[in-house]
Amino acid sequence: MRLVERDREVGALTDLLRQTEQGHGGIAVVSGGTGSGKTELLDMVRGLATDAGFVALQATASWAERLSPGSVLEQLPRYADTAPDHSGAVSKVLARLGAIRADADGRTLERWPLDAATAAALHQLSAEVVRISVQAPVLLCVDDIQFTDSLSLHWILQLVRALRSSRIALVVAECTLSKSAHPHLHTELLRQPNYRRLDLHALSQAGVGAVLAAHMDPDRAAVLAADCHRVSGGNPLLVRALVEDQRHTVVLPDTSPGLVVGDAYADTVLSCLHRGRTTALRLAQALAVLDEADTGTGRPVRLLDEEAATVEQCRSGLEAAGLISAGRFRHPVARDAVLQNLSSHARRDLHRRAAELLYEDGASAVRIAPHLLAAEPGCPAWGLPVLREAADRYLSGNRADDAHACLDAALAMCRDDGERVALRAQLAGTAWLLNPSISARHLGELASALRDGRLPDQHALPLAKHLLWHGRFEEAVEAIERMGRRGTGTGLDPAGASDLSATRELLSATYPPLLRSAVLSVQGGPVPRPRPTGDESSRIHGAAALTRVLSQGPGTTAADDAEAAMRVMRLGKNTQEWIMCAVAALLFGERLEAAGSWCDHWLAEARERRVPLWEAEFASLRASILLRQGDPAGARNLAEGALARVPAKSWGVCLGGPLANLVQAATEMGDYEAAEEYLGVPVLEGMFSTRFGLYFLHARGRHHLETGRPYAALDDFMACASRMRDWGFDQPSLVPWRSEAARAHLALGDRDKAHTLALEELSLIGSGRFRARGLTLRALAATGDDPARVALLTEAAETLQAAGDRLQTAGALADLGRAHLRAERRELAHPVLETAARLAGESKAGPLAAAVAEDLARARPRCAPEDAVRADRVAALDLLSGAERRVAALAARGHTNKEISERLFITVSTVEQHLTRVFRKLDVRARRELPVESRLQAAE
């Protein structure tokens, strides 16, 4: 067996054995922490000695037998019979010592002075060992010498005095975690001329790597070496424990998992600590509780009520053993193991005393609070303000879980009714960030406090929002009206008035039927709007932008205001809902790319801040954006993630958002069974009085229509119509209910009604290339006459492509391809349908992809010479630049050069130059020979 990085020590002990053989006995003291390899080193030297003809005697002292006289000596008979004379003299002397010990009637040596008979027996034992050494050299190894009982130690000291002129070698090992061996033993050893001390140092990173390589794949060992060295501190025993943890780890092919720190490591840490002195174990427990960067031993000394020198010695031992570094355990698993090994009472008591010490030292609230929480029950009176301050700091640091724990503990210990109401309001607001359902249990008492006038003003509006979320509209309106009445008088400060204005804008865009009377006017008069500044202004502008888009339709002003507001705001509990409104303003304002970019930014921030509700809401909003960009699979993943982060029962009336996304995405992907399951999720009736209810009705209506239930679909679309008209939000960019209802009427055979609805919707939409316009043009083409269908669908495809909706573009191109097929224009239908098939496949829209595949089979063109020429020209389209394609597309449609120049904002001369190059590259001589595919390629 070869010990890693122990060549120096092995060499020194080998030299000791050689000198002993020559008649110069000596002593070696091996010193190292628990697990440092000292026991293995003793085993190795004993093996070398046995091979060299030594009589090897071995014993191991233990803490449990340290007060039992002769406990080390009684282990020697196991090896004494290896003496060359086989006389058994050593065994006989030891048996006599045993009888003398028995006569002591169980008394320890401290109460039992060394009498003449015992002294004589010990002297005879020493003489026998010296006699044996004349015939064969003797090696005596004692491990954990610091635990040797006094009787055995007395004999060892006797033997030491005979070493210099005998062939006897003494090798003892001591653990640095334990109290040093008896001082008189060290003094006597130092007097000997052939004395050597071997301090076992920790393994280097290379040494750790060598140990790992002996037990696993060398490449993986090289990867893990640095982390293993950091966690183990180079302690060989801990390294082997980590090897054991890796053995229980399943490594998949082509993967390289990091270091696994598990049960073997935790058990070994505890074993190391329990083999050391009691003070070292207590210090380890204190350090586990304090868990603070190295600030010296002052606080641990006070916590343990021990001498500073003793604590410092134990601290050095823990570091030498590779258990701690800079006052902290090297890995959380080690700290957790030490804490779990404590009894619950002892753990609470340590935390209580740690909190008191930190409070006396003027430590910050966030340092004291964890100890107060761990010491419950029995928190001291001064703990209440500490917990409240810690909660505020935790919230500022995006640690809502910790803030909630502090407020919960503070509420439990508070006895003042007025303070309890404020604490409960803070607790409800913090619980809201984690899971709205957790906060629901506080709402009843807070609503009662509001009615009784006990709830502070600053908590009234947050309470209103929470009540609205859970569908408790009447109580919410009462809270808002109360704040409104305060705002009309002099009782509301400027900050409260600004908050009221910002909240009014926020809620009026989400709960329009219930909040309109309560928010917009109170007791016959409008709520005054103070001149807002800073964040208040940004919040108002962000929410107002959404209201403007919902009531007036897409426009650059509202979208610009929304982006400007988000540039100023920072994500926090007082801005998150308004940021959601600003992103929604971009979404319904047909600025999908900007909406997606901003939403990605806020979602990343929410994840970084670890606030579950924010993550879920931004994920759901991003799913809505992806649906409008034609990515139902991506939308479904995000919406499912949102419901995994915050369960459905916690979404309240806002559940319509993620559910609508899931229903629509599953429907578009052809997973109708899953869509039905999503529709079966229970929802609050109040949801249908919110903007989120519109999303749900729209998605459910589309599902009904796709699954052959046009009457049910029409009911849902008309329910959207009724609400949107009543609320003043009748904009197709929110929900295009007219074009959806037109499709339902078309399925029922009422083409005239369908056509009227499509025309009505088109009149509400501007001439811009909005997504809603593209959807309406599709509906108009489906309900109109064949001659106009191709032009309408061509514009619809271009508009939807420009708007960024891949799936709807595929649908428009599929409709266009079918229109060409009906007109027997296969050569035009085929390339259009090919593009539609590609886009539908990229969108993972199964039903559309299947339908287009059938149309493609019918549209496959016949092979003819003119078709081959046309195919060559289509292939040559790849040679055109982007500008040339745009010009060619308009020319193929029949536009004059002047019309093309006006539409593309270029000169007529530039148009002519582009056309000249297009004609040459495509080998055509007239505009009528331009392939129609050029405009489709340009639209892409």
Image (tube, rainbow, N blue to C red):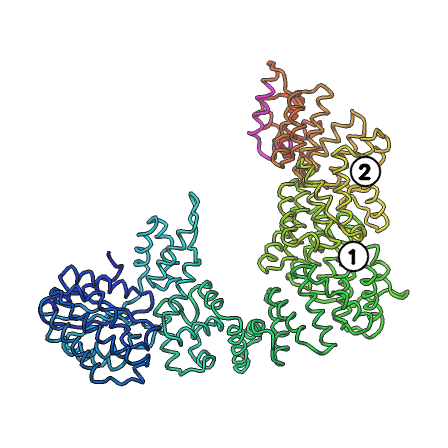
Q: Mark 1 points at which residue?
A: 471
Which type of secondary structure does the marked residue at label 1 adopt?
Answer: loop
- Expressed as whole percent of the image width and height from the top left, the position of residue 468 reads 77, 59
Q: Examine the residues drawn in magenta and state their main secondary structure.
A: helix
For image coordinates 73% across by 25% down, the residue present is 819
Left or right of 808, for residue 174:
left
Count of all numbered marks drawn on residues in the image = 2
Q: Mark 2 points at which residue?
A: 712
Q: In this view, does 44 lie above or below 916?
A: below
How crowded pointer 1 is (Cα within 10 Å; few <14, some 14-19, many 20+) is rated as: many
- Observer able to see residue 382: yes
| CA–CA distance in space, label 2 to label 1 | 26 Å
Q: Is residue 120 above or below residue 492?
A: below
Residue furthest top in the image: 864
Front one among 306 and 364: 306
Residue 879, magenta (yes or no): yes
Give the amino acid at mark 1: Gly
- Expressed as whole percent of the image width and height from the top left, the position of residue 607 reads 59, 56
Residue 64, magenta (yes or no): no
Snapshot quadrant of residue 790:
top right
- Expressed as whole percent of the image width and height from the top left, the position of residue 42 reads 24, 65
Left or right of 777, for residue 374:
left
